[in-house]
Amino acid sequence: MENEFLDKVKDNAAVRACSEKLQSEKGDSLVEGYTSGLWSFTRINVTQNDLQELRDIWAHWNEGTKQLFYQNYGDISYLFDVEVDKHLFRAMAHFWNSVYSCFTFGEVDLVPTVEEYTTLLRCPKIQVNKAYSKVFNGLTFAKKLMSITGMSKPWVTARIQQKRDGKCIPWENLRDLVLVHPDKRKRVDIFILSIYGLVIFPRALRHVDEAVTDLFNRLDKRITSVLAILDKTFRSLSMRQKAGKGRFIGCAQLLLVWFHRHFSKVNKVSYRVFSESYSPLKEEAAMQRRDDILEEKWMEILQNLKEEDTEWRAFWMVLAEILYRCGKFD
């Protein structure tokens, strides 16, 4: 056992040496003379859907229905119990570096990774090597909703609305189905569709967008949604910063959980090493965090972050092997 541990330590040292050598040889990917535009004013809107109805539905489900949900969709239900600190989120948006696609907090450059978000969502059915991409299957929005909900074409078409440049369905219609649908699996499916539309990709408030149904149809094939979530997060942050204003369209809850877990030293909270059965989202949802720190104070804190303030490796991540070299190729 001791020799096996020492071998892993040696391998880790080799990975670090390889990384430092590459950085020394190849340097930065940006052009010489690049100047960061981080200090331009950004007034981001973090308006969220009211998720109390989702909480109420979940609270009234029996344990069997909840277990069916966990088995198919993981820990995502904990997201609607994570409070969004608007002061912190607005402050964070000022430090988003759209050129590097990362946050630059004082001396710290950091960005959410696929592995971190996958661990947070903790879904046993997800296969991380199956990335989501939109597949054209010829189905209309109405037909996709009919398949997901089990409702008739007249019922579905009567409830589809046009919002800006896309189609959507009001949450109220999906909520009523979740409450009365006789098929337990359909209730669970409609509920997860609503979570993706209201929490993960809240494009139109109190509506579920057509694009969410495309993603939902791929989830059943054990495809991970993490890349799509990160892509929407990065794009929305970059677009809002470029415009200087606008509403963030992405999962604010996941991004704030990620922040708190890496900057636990700032919050004076210590974490232990966890097993595969540990749910970081569940713990985060149960935490009582301060929300009385103003945006200006958060700006000061983030601007002065030092390397020692940061947990570089999220302690809730389970150790795993990585492929860093194949023959002579990095």
Image: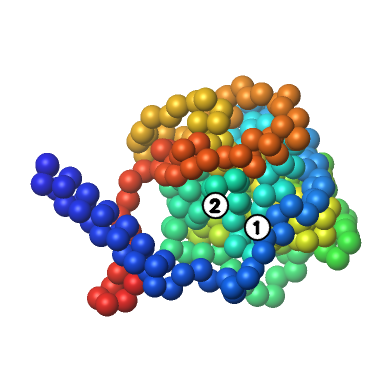
Residue assigned mark 2: 109
Q: Number of callouts in the render?
A: 2
- Quadrant where the C terminus sits is bottom left
215 or 297, which lies in front?
297
Residue at x-position 60% and y-position 46%: 105
Residue assigned mark 1: 97
Residue at x-position 74% and y-position 42%: 90
Residue at x-position 41% and y-position 38%: 315
Task: Pinpoint residue 172: horizontal percent, then vertical percent.
Answer: 82, 41
Q: CA distance from mark 2 to mark 1?
A: 9 Å
Q: Label 2 crowding class (10 Å Cα cut-off): few <14, some 14-19, many 20+?
A: some
* Marks 2 & 1, CB-CB < 8 Å contact: yes
Kind of residue sitting beneath label 2: Asp
Q: Is residue 179 visible?
A: no
Relative to residue 92, is residue 120 drawn left or right? left
Q: Secondary structure at mark 1?
A: strand
210 or 153, which lies in front?
210
Please report whichever mark, 2 or 1, sits nearer to the chain's N-terminal start: 1
Kind of residue sitting beneath label 1: Asn
Task: Pinpoint residue 272: horizontal percent, then vertical percent.
Answer: 38, 29
Q: Secondary structure at mark 2?
A: strand
256 or 166, which lies in front?
256
Residue 97 occupies quadrant: bottom right
- Quadrant where the N terminus sits is top left
Task: Pinpoint residue 239: horizontal percent, then vertical percent.
Answer: 76, 61
Tell which residue pokes out farthest to the bottom in this image: 328
> Is residue 134 shown above or below 300?
below
Q: Is residue 114 visible?
A: yes
Residue at x-position 33% and y-position 46%: 319
Q: Label 1 crowding class (10 Å Cα cut-off): few <14, some 14-19, many 20+?
A: many
